[in-house]
Amino acid sequence: MSVRTGNWFGRAAVPVLAVVATLLAIWYVAVVPMNVKEVLTQAEREGAVVVPPSAAERRDAGRWGLVFANAHLLGASWSMDRARLPAPHQVAGELWKSTWVEETTGRRGIVRSGTLSNRSLVYHGGVTLGATVLGFVIGSVLGVLLAVGIVYNRAMDLSVMPWAIISQTIPIVALAPMIIVVLYSVGLSGLVAKAAISAYLSFFPVAVGMVKGLRSPDAMQLDLLRTYSAGKAQSFWKLRLPASVPYLFASLKIAIAASLVGAIVGELPVQRGGLGARMLGGSYYGQTEQIWAALIVAAVMAAGLVWLIGWIERRTLRAMGARP
Amino acid sequence: MVIDAKNLSLTFQTGDGPVHALKDVNLTVEKGDFVSFIGPSGCGKTTFLRAIAALEHPTSGTLTVNGMGADEARKARAYGYVFQAAGLYPWRTIGGNIRLPLEIMGYGRADMDSRVKNVLELVELAGFEKKYPWQLSGGMQQRASIARALAFDADLLLMDEPFGALDEIVRDRLNEELLALWARTKKTIAFVTHSIPEAVYLSTKIVVMSPRPGRITDVIESPLPRERPLDIRDTPEFIEIAHRVRDGLRAGHGDGV
């Protein structure tokens, strides 16, 4: 496939693969100094002569110094159990094991039990995805409604935006447990509580984008509608709303990514499934491979969701007569 | 009498004090007239047109359109307005853009379809109904915006420098087409321009205006016949009227234009 005339995948494939290859190379190199102390301790236990010989001295030594002094002992760097930084193939192995292998051969996997295993990333990814999508829908609807209120109501114009901005300056990690506790006390927990945090993060970009979009028609276009004696509702449906669509999609892409972050943060304090729970669980038990595997699933999910919005955007704008 | 202005004044309050956009303007426009408003920037020609459209409100004096107040006339959808830019909605086809006022005014579906077809033929855009604005040249877009103003039953067409952004060749052609359209539809047209040949070529009545304060300095009833080929611009009568317009502009300005 020609690089210049290929489709989107064709055009993007070469640069994307080059970046991925570079990152993997850096990762593989970084594994050595990151794990060097544990690797040397293990080698010492197996009888090798390590420089310097005392563990206390090694603790305070520089990582690169240890790497160069013991270069011949570092073969185990890329296959450590509970490595400080697991190698990419270890993470890939964990990913494979906790998705395909777990579901097809595990006792609790879908093949043998009929339901997704609660030890698989497919299950946890699904839990997070559900909260993300629900929160995104709530947040987007809320954002659009707020924007309409801000554009059409002077009191809301003056009062809502400052609060919306303040709401986004509070670190979500600090706020999330409180939201969960407050919602739990009124009988809302699980999916809805996590979706609330997602919605909290995703309404803001939508509201800001939609205010700008709804105000994007210029004076001449508004005057044109006045010459027809169009009412407020007509000018909203026929002019302001369609004019705001490109702004809406730009905001939705930000909102869906923020929504995923919100869902993961919402899963941290609860530990009832989801990628956030997997990440925190992995860090409790030193299962770094598990953390990385969950991170990668989250990243792929975010990329997929943003791509999906972009795809809908392209379809919608094409249907609205955009220049192809 | 379609438009009747008596002692009309309009003052904008700005940070630098009041700006007298119009001062003591008196004018009547009869049904079927083609009136051009010409003058330098700031003479109030566009403000006057916007006042007729009830997009601006006079500070004093009286203004009636079709015998009603300007606001009532706007609510009665007495006029179609053509702006300097075509201002077509990019997300609507040409047909969809022309349908816009019809949808707002609540015309029936079948009626809309036949009106869209009619006005597209009138502005020589038949066959472009399903195209999007970006697929049309600037001149064609402006024709579509004229079609949009003609689609509903308003006998008055207000045009604010509609061809100002177009090149001279396109402008000549659209001027010719506009005259033909005016003859066929028998509408009353009020037309703002800053081109002397355009004003003289199109109008039955030329209103010369001058700035600070915006006022009318001369009203010329054109002796040219209603049927006007483009080469009428080389006749002595045409040149004489153009000369009088230029004199009017110069006198109003107090120095050379």
Image (cartoon, coloured by chain):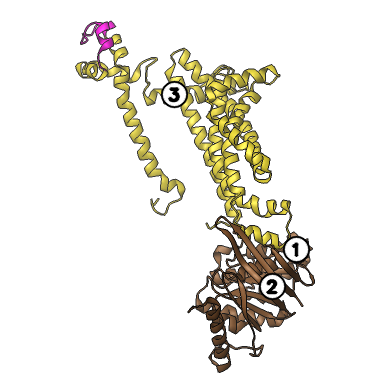
Tell me if label 3 and label 2 are in contact, CB under 8 Å: no
Q: What number is the disc on residue A292? A: 3
Type of the residue with mark 1: Asp
* Quadrant of the snapshot with the N terminus of chain B: bottom right
Residue A296 x %, y %? 46, 28
Report crowding for label 1: few under 14, some 14 to 19, many 20 or more residues within 10 A (C-alpha).
many
Answer yes or no: are tags 1 and 2 on the same subunit: yes
Q: Nearer the viewer, mark 3 or mark 2?
A: 2
Q: Nearer the viewer, mark 1 or mark 2?
A: 1
CA gap, disc 3 and disc 2:
69 Å
Q: Secondary structure at mark 3?
A: helix
CA gap, disc 1 and disc 2:
16 Å
In which chain is the residue bearing label 2? B
**Residue A78, picture quadrant:** top left
Residue depicted at 63% across the width and 68% down the height: B22
Residue A245 x %, y %? 60, 49
Residue annotated with mark 1:
B71
**Residue B147, picture quadrant:** bottom right
In which chain is the residue bearing label 1? B
Judged left or right of residue B107, residue A14 is left
Give the extent of the magenta segment. A44-62
Type of the residue with mark 2: Leu
Q: What number is the disc on residue B157? A: 2
Q: Secondary structure at mark 2?
A: strand
Tell me if label 1 and label 2 are in contact, CB under 8 Å: no
Tell me: residue A26, above or below residue B68: above
Q: Is residue A120 visible?
A: no
In the rendered image, residue A10 lying in the magenta stretch gets the answer no
Chain appearing in yellow on the rendered image: A
Residue B201 x %, y %? 59, 84
Q: Colour of chain B?
A: brown
Of the image marks 1 and 2, the number of the one nearer the N terminus: 1
